[in-house]
Image (cartoon, rainbow, N blue to C red):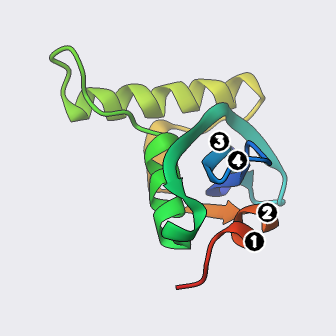
Amino acid sequence: MTALTRLVTFVDVDNQAADTISVSARHEAELVDGTRVLLLNDRGWGSSQGWAATSVADIQETTRAVVGPDEPFSGRSQEDMEADHWASLQQIAQRQGVIVDTAALRQLPHDVVLSQRVLARITPR
């Protein structure tokens, strides 16, 4: 198995001109040697809330929710959703040559890194 150190999600401004929040999120797994493997590059969110009304903690919390696992739907349990989420990430990593099991992925710390453009838009609290 490949040794991973953490999951990291990079958040950046998605719409430069907007006064409302619009961000993209890139979710990666970081290996012991510092290289990273892309897991998800199709995530992000928007809010009618203005940048001045949010905080670093708010953005980090929402980011962790957006990259999964998703909320249950159609009679599925939270456990089902979590199992599917981690299995999907494990398969994505495996296709890129990173052999890891779902239990190891679940245990990794998850850091959220905000771009300078995001930080510049958030009013310090």
Rounded to the nearest whole Å, what is the CA distance between mark 3 and mark 1?
A: 40 Å
Mark 3 touches mark 1? (CB < 8 Å)? no
Instruction: Report the side of 82 relative to 41 (left or right).
Output: left
Q: Earlier in the sequence, mark 2 or mark 4?
A: 4
| Residue type beneath disc 1 | Ala
| Residue type beneath disc 2 | Arg
Tell me which corner region of the image, top left, top right, bottom left or bottom right, holds residue 40: top right
Return the x and y of residue 120 as percentages of the image width and height. 75, 71
Which marked residue is nearer to the observer: mark 1 or mark 4? 4
The image's mark for residue 117 is 2
| Residue type beneath disc 3 | Met
Q: Residues within 10 Å of mark 3 (few under 14, many from 20)?
A: few
Secondary-structure class at tag 2: helix
Q: Which residue is mark 4?
A: 18
Mark 3 touches mark 4? (CB < 8 Å)? no
Q: Which residue is mark 1?
A: 120
Which marked residue is nearer to the observer: mark 3 or mark 1? 1
Q: Which residue is mark 3?
A: 1
Rounded to the nearest whole Å, what is the CA distance between mark 2 and mark 4?
A: 13 Å
Rounded to the nearest whole Å, what is the CA distance between mark 1 and mark 4?
A: 14 Å
Q: Earlier in the sequence, mark 1 or mark 4?
A: 4
